[in-house]
């Protein structure tokens, strides 16, 4: 009996709606009533009809079993991220960025105090805890303007002095016009670089004349033929613009390495079509691979071509490390051709400002620190590190994040989501829906009007400036005058056994020129068995 009652109890909310609809209807017929009585009748009648539709539909089992009340499940599911973020999330729970990380950006962007009272909330004795080894005798003072590095090798005619901290690749189309303008004006004010993303150089990038790194993806947007191939003449025209300081070939990105993309025709606005050089009314494809080169040797030839067409500006490439043998093949192509990129940006699999398939987000690509150390040390191993500058991207938020990356091997750092927070992103994680609540990652005209480029540009500037001030203080505390003096033994890490050791004890170590000897594979195998086999099997003629 109890089981039967319990089984039918799920219909009680619907039955009550029907009951109150009938009761309020009868009540209305008895005497004259105000507008509130009609509203109650309308509400219960509406819910009764909803319940009938629920039990007769076949798409959602939960609605069929729980008419009316089942909708609460979908309502709470809709607001679950907000409920978790504002009510349940702890200060240091990273999903993907913790409240403490976001608060740090907001405070520095607003010029508010970023100080923390009563000490750390971190467990300093847990495995993985890291800290900077300070000196007893800190001296000097470092200005944000001092933290720069010059990019450009022997074949570069127009080297560029880049800030240690810059805006990572985010395209117009992924971000709103107002967000792009805020980022670029902030970059102009602070004297740092703004990566265009593969969506090409838009009018909004040009509005405030901030330094640009033009990212060239497999779609060759802004310099493509009608068939979608690379167009040298169009490239040379855009690359000659003084605002463009460096050219970056995007081989792969951390969010979805090895995966192409499609911009549906319905989302292509006249502005996007003009910026990317694509037709309206047709789906726009970004292939997974490039058509301008198909081997390491051809990549080197393409770098040479772009350097000539750009008038000698720094040319490099960005990649997320995947198959180690393919990176070794690129190294061997550099040695074979004597063509060396001016820079390489290592994108970590933990990165990603937009949306990507779950499997790619969680299980494809090498994390930034691992990829960076491999690239840094193997460039040393082949004697080319001094000729190539290394940038990195992958959850860079704080001054310590920058210091750690530079200690592992980076020359500069890029941040995408950090600067998104600076212009107002609240981590709603609705970037792919065009429903961004703050107007950052949307093409909806009404939504993006909420983002004032003038106000947010100052926040971009202050976030960059205050982060570099904090970085300078860290360097002074550790006894360094610049990030280029940092090495991995400056960072202490508590290992899985609870022992605090210098970070370099667990990282790949190579001496200059070691990979040019016959024993190269032996040196690599000392890091982990089989790494030398990747080197032996790699060839400069194919991936």
Image (cartoon, rainbow, N blue to C red):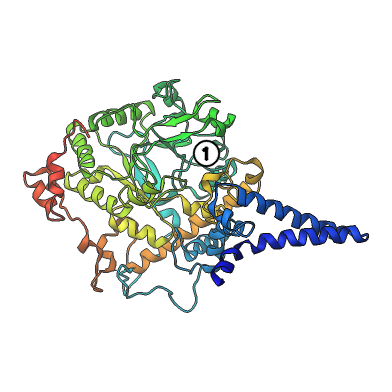
**Where, quadrant-wise, is the N terminus in this rendering?**
bottom right
Q: Nearer the viewer, residue 124 or 301?
A: 124
Give coordinates of residue 296: x percent, y percent.
24, 33
Give coordinates of residue 13: x percent, y percent.
66, 62
Q: Circle 1: is it few (<14), some (14-19), or many (20+) Cα within 10 Å?
A: many
- Specify the quadrant of the image occupied by residue 400: bottom left
Give coordinates of residue 280: x percent, y percent.
55, 25
- Rendered view: 293 above or below 407: above
Residue at the outermost bottom position: 118
Q: Nearer the viewer, residue 363 or 344?
A: 363
Q: Nearer the viewer, residue 12 or 88?
A: 12
Residue at the outermost right position: 32
51 sits to left or right of 274: right
Residue shown at the point (23%, 39%) measured from the top left: 326
**Is there any visible trace of residue 200 in the rendered image?**
no
Residue shown at the point (49%, 60%) measured from the top left: 466
297 sits to left or right of 471: left
Give coordinates of residue 53: x percent, y percent.
65, 49
**Where, quadrant-wise, is the C terminus in this rendering?**
top left
- Rendered view: 194 above or below 136: above
32 sits to left or right of 389: right
Exactly how many numbered labels are in the figure?
A: 1
Q: Which residue is mark 1?
A: 172
Residue shown at the point (28%, 56%) measured from the top left: 408
**Is there any visible trace of residue 327 in the rendered image?**
yes
Residue at the outermost front position: 1
- Rendered view: 80 above or below 496: above
Q: Nearer the viewer, residue 526 or 342?
A: 526
Kind of element beneath mark 1: loop
């Amino acid at each position: 009996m109890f089981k039967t009652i319990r089984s039918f109890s799920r219909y009680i909310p619907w039955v009550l709606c029907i009951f109150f609809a009938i009761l309020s209807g009868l009540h209305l017929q008895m005497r004259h009533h105000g507008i509130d009585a009609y509203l109650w009748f309308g509400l219960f009648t509406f819910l009764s009809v909803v319940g009938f539709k629920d039990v007769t539909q076949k798409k959602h089992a939960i609605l069929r079993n729980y008419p009316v009340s089942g909708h609460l499940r979908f309502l709470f599911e809709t607001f679950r991220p907000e409920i978790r973020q504002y009510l349940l999330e702890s200060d240091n729970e990273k999903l993907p960025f913790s409240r403490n990380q976001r608060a740090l950006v907001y405070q520095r962007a607003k010029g508010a105090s970023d100080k923390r009272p009563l000490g750390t909330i971190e467990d300093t004795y847990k495995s993985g805890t890291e800290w900077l080894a300070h000196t007893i005798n800190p001296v000097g003072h470092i200005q944000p303007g001092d933290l720069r590095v010059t990019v450009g090798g022997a074949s570069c005619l127009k080297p560029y002095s880049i800030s240690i901290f810059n805006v990572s690749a985010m395209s117009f189309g992924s971000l709103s016009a107002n967000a792009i303008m805020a980022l670029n004006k902030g970059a102009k004010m602070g004297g740092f670089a703004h990566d265009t993303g593969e969506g090409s150089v838009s009018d909004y990038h040009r509005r405030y004349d901030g330094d640009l790194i033009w990212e060239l993806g497999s779609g060759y947007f802004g310099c493509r033929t009608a068939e979608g191939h690379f167009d040298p003449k169009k490239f040379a025209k855009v690359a000659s613009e003084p605002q463009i300081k460096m050219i970056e070939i995007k081989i792969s990105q951390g969010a979805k390495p090895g995966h192409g993309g499609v911009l549906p025709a319905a989302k292509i606005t006249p502005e996007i079509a003009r910026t990317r050089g694509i037709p309206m009314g047709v789906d726009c494809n970004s292939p997974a691979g490039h058509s301008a080169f198909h081997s390491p040797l051809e990549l080197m030839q393409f770098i040479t071509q772009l350097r000539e067409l750009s008038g000698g500006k720094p040319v490099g490439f960005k990649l997320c490390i995947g198959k180690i043998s393919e990176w070794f093949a690129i190294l061997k192509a550099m040695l074979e051709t004597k063509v060396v990129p001016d820079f390489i940006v290592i994108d970590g699999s933990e990165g990603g400002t937009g949306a990507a398939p779950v499997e790619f987000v969680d299980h494809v690509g090498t994390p930034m620190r691992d990829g960076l150390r491999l690239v840094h040390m193997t460039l040393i191993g082949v004697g080319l590190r001094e000729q190539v500058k290394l940038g990195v991207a992958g959850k860079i938020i704080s001054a310590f994040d920058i210091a750690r990356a530079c200690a592992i091997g980076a020359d500069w750092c890029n941040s995408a989501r950090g600067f998104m927070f600076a212009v107002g992103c609240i981590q709603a994680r609705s970037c792919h829906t065009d429903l961004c609540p703050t107007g950052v990652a949307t093409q909806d005209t009404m939504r993006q009007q909420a983002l004032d480029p003038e106000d947010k540009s100052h926040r971009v500037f202050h976030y960059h400036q205050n982060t570099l001030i904090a970085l300078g203080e860290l360097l002074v505390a550790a006894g360094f005058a610049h990030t280029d003096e940092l090495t991995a033994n400056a960072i202490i890490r508590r290992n899985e056994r609870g022992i605090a050791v210098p970070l370099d004890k667990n990282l790949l170590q190579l001496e200059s020129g070691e990979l040019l000897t016959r024993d190269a594979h032996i040196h690599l195998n000392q890091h982990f068995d089989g790494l030398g086999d990747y080197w032996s099997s790699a060839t400069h003629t194919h991936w």
